[in-house]
Image (cartoon, grey):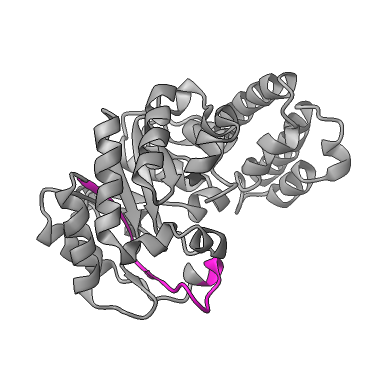
Amino acid sequence: MIDWTDRHCRYFHRLLSPHARLYTEMIATGAILYGDAARHLDFDNSEHPVALQLGGNEPEALARAARAGQDWGYDEINLNCGCPSDRVQKGAFGACLMSTPALVADCVKAMRDAVDIPVTVKHRIGLDYDESYGFVRDFVGTVHEAGCEVFIVHARNAVLKGLSPKENREIPPLRYDVARQLKRDFPRTLIVLNGGLTDPGDTLAHVGQGGGELDGVMLGREAYHRPRVLSELSRRLWPETPIPGDEAVVRAMMDYAGRQVAGGVPLRSVVRHMLGLFNTQGGARRWRQMLSDNRLLAANDPALIDAAWQVVANAAERRAA
């Protein structure tokens, strides 16, 4: 989710799901240690609980970056062992790390020694076309021995040569049974399922609340393109917690955008994450058009959000009439 789940996206998603754990985009250790750390680490207090996802393969550098994340106020440090992009492969981290479980264990131990918050791992279930269960079982076992107690399992293989990142999300088959077997073999760990989850009912069928075996679910692109799925899941998991309606969300984002623009953030950086809010509803197309119109965005005026909302609200009134 690089360049997707930034702090503006997470602020928006928190409005839609008051209790879900939010994750940053993967941030390379070098960007934190040698770049503009504030730009990468800053977040709003409303985002809690929020996890910092790191990319890297050097235990000492990961430990320093993890400590920076804890000092900044994050609730969890997550090591990415699942991204298959060419850029990540050149840095020898992401999914590449699954081929060196002992190194991952060293990285986890170094981070755990450096921080007091949980250190977790996100990974695939295999590399290239090796679908043997033993590969991922041994990976999880080795990392678990280093103290990792939470594994976020993207239930597809990562094909490092020959498939693009997009194809890696679509072509390798989903094998949810592997995640379930990991839970049986490592019952004291928390296993969170990721990959191909879209329908709220089908998604929750994998976890204990829905009669499944697993401990949680993670949604990425579905939540980004259809953000209201977060609200649908929240209503089922936490029925006692009210979820803001469309107008309340829009007003909150207008206020947020106003504060960000006043601080020098372009309006585009905020509203680009909101394009899918009304997908499947009347007025959704015009909403997307207005919030991505270069001419309208050039004014850098948060009132654009209200103008786009009026289109959606009027469409709803016409349907009701």
- Residue 5: x percent and y percent? 54, 43
- Residue 108: x percent and y percent? 27, 45
Residue sitting at x 35%, y 28%: 241
Residue sitting at x 28%, y 40%: 110
Boundaries of the magenta span: 149-167
Residue sitting at x 75%, y 39%: 311
Q: Nearer the viewer, residue 46 or 83?
A: 83
Q: Nearer the viewer, residue 31 or 291?
A: 31
Compared to residue 44, the image places residue 16 above or below, namely: below
Side (left or right) of 105 relative to 74 = left
Side (left or right) of 60 relative to 142 = right
Compared to residue 41, the image places residue 84 above or below, namely: below
Q: Nearer the viewer, residue 289 or 257?
A: 257
* Quadrant occupied by the C terminus: top right
Query: Toward which corner of the image does residue 132 lie, by quadrant?
Result: bottom left
Q: Would residue 66 be visible to someone looking at this image? A: yes
Q: Residue furthest right?
A: 295
Compared to residue 266, the image places residue 82 above or below, namely: below
Q: How many marks?
A: 0
Instruction: Please say whether residue 157 is one of the residues in the magenta stretch.
Output: yes
Q: Would residue 212 be visible to someone looking at this image? A: no
Side (left or right) of 20 relative to 84 = left
- Residue 156: x percent and y percent? 37, 69
Side (left or right) of 41 relative to 187 = right
